[in-house]
């Protein structure tokens, strides 16, 4: 048995397991606390974002929402429009026509329509670049944040947020939320966060598929290696 454990550790599985445990711990920290109507502090659990990179329809819809509702204020400076066309399987003509709001060169990165410096003076905080936002905060945090705006007349833009108290960002999806049922709204925001997760790591799906086969290959390789090990040591006692 100890040989088996040693072999597993040698194969880097130990490292993989530790990494998974680390990620789970980071996500377990929740989505902040808020004070409820009775004045008691409540812990807000994160909702799970529906991330699925194989669902091209969801990613395409997410790209559409991002470019129409977010790129006015937020940049995504590590993402090129051409990469969206390529990875999300959208014909470049359609990207040029519908998804390029801040440039006319498809090779350009996504820049904010309004200079973030100028916006800082309007909102009190500059809208951060969103290329790596899901990597920074986690998919579920971003998803919960976007679903947690509520009306608050005391705020300059009439809205506040449960996850990020006194957020400087207005509730930009307010009209969408009004027009759709809660379920439909969550599905739209889910598509948006799916797209943002793709922006954060476009190769994530490929990496996971390749990773699965690498681990599978190593597990299969373990059988002959284990038998060989037994064979080598059988006379040495
Ligand atoms: C009117 C300008 C504006 C628009 C449009 C806008 N935002 Fe923001 N956003 C901001 C500002 C300003 C902040 C900074 C908030 C703060 O720090 O309190 C922000 C913050 C954020 C944050 C939190 C960043 C962090 O880690 O603290 C996320 C996530 C975010 N925006 C996502 C979006 C998404 C997704 C959209 C499109 C649906 C969007 N925003 C549209 C202005 C905007």
Image (tube, rainbow, N blue to C red):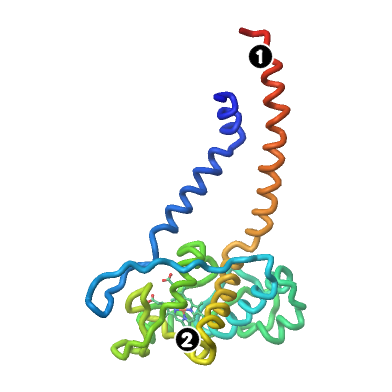
The quadrant of the picture occupied by the C terminus is: top right
| Image quarter of the N terminus | top right
Q: Is mark 2 within 8 Å of ligand 1?
A: yes
Image quadrant where residue 37 sits: bottom left
Which residue was labeled with disc 1? 233
| Closest to the observer, 97 or 224 | 224
Residue 172 or residue 78, whichever sits in front: 172
* Residue 146 point in image, percent of width and height: 46, 77
Residue 98: x and y in percent read 68, 86
Crowd class of label 1 (few under 14; some 14 to 19; many from 20; radius 10 Å)? few
Q: Position of residue 54 (x, y in %)?
A: 69, 65
Q: Which residue is mark 2?
A: 172
**Location of ligand 1 given as a quarter of the image:** bottom left
Q: Left or right? Give the position of 211 relative to 139.
A: right
Pair 2/1: label in front: 1
**Residue at 68% from the left image edge and 8% from the top image edge:** 235
Seen from the viewer's position, the closer of residues 133 and 40 is: 40
SS for dot 2: loop
Q: CA distance from mark 2 to mark 1?
A: 68 Å
Q: Residue at x 45, y 72 (%)?
A: 144
Where residue 103 appears, as percent x and y from the top left, is 64, 82
Q: Is residue 233 above or below residue 137?
A: above
Give whichever of discs 2 and 1 has the lower sequence position. 2
Badge 2: residue crowd in 10 Å (few <14, some 14–19, many ≥20): some
> Which residue reaches farthest left?
39
């Amino acid at each position: 048995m100890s040989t088996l454990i040693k072999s597993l550790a040698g194969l880097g599985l130990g490292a993989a397991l530790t990494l998974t445990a680390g990620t789970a711990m980071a996500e377990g920290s929740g989505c902040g606390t808020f004070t409820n109507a009775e004045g008691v502090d409540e812990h807000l659990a994160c909702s799970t974002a529906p991330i699925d990179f194989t669902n091209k329809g969801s990613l395409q819809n997410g790209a559409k929402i991002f470019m129409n509702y977010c790129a006015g204020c937020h940049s995504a400076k590590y993402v090129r429009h051409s990469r969206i066309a390529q990875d999300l399987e959208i014909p470049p003509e359609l990207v040029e026509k519908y998804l390029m709001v801040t440039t006319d060169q498809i090779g350009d990165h996504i820049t904010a329509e309004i200079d973030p410096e100028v916006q800082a003076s309007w909102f009190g905080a500059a809208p951060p670049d969103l290329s790596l936002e899901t990597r920074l905060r986690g998919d579920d945090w971003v998803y919960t944040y976007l679903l947690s705006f509520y009306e608050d007349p005391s705020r300059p833009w009439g809205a506040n947020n449960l996850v990020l108290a006194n957020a400087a960002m207005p509730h930009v999806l307010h009209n969408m939320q009004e027009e759709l049922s809660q379920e439909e709204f969550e599905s739209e925001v889910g598509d948006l966060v799916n797209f943002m997760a793709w922006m954060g790591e476009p190769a994530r799906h490929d990496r996971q598929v390749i990773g699965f086969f690498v681990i599978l290959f190593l597990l299969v390789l373990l059988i002959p290696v284990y038998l060989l090990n037994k064979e080598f040591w059988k006379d040495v006692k």
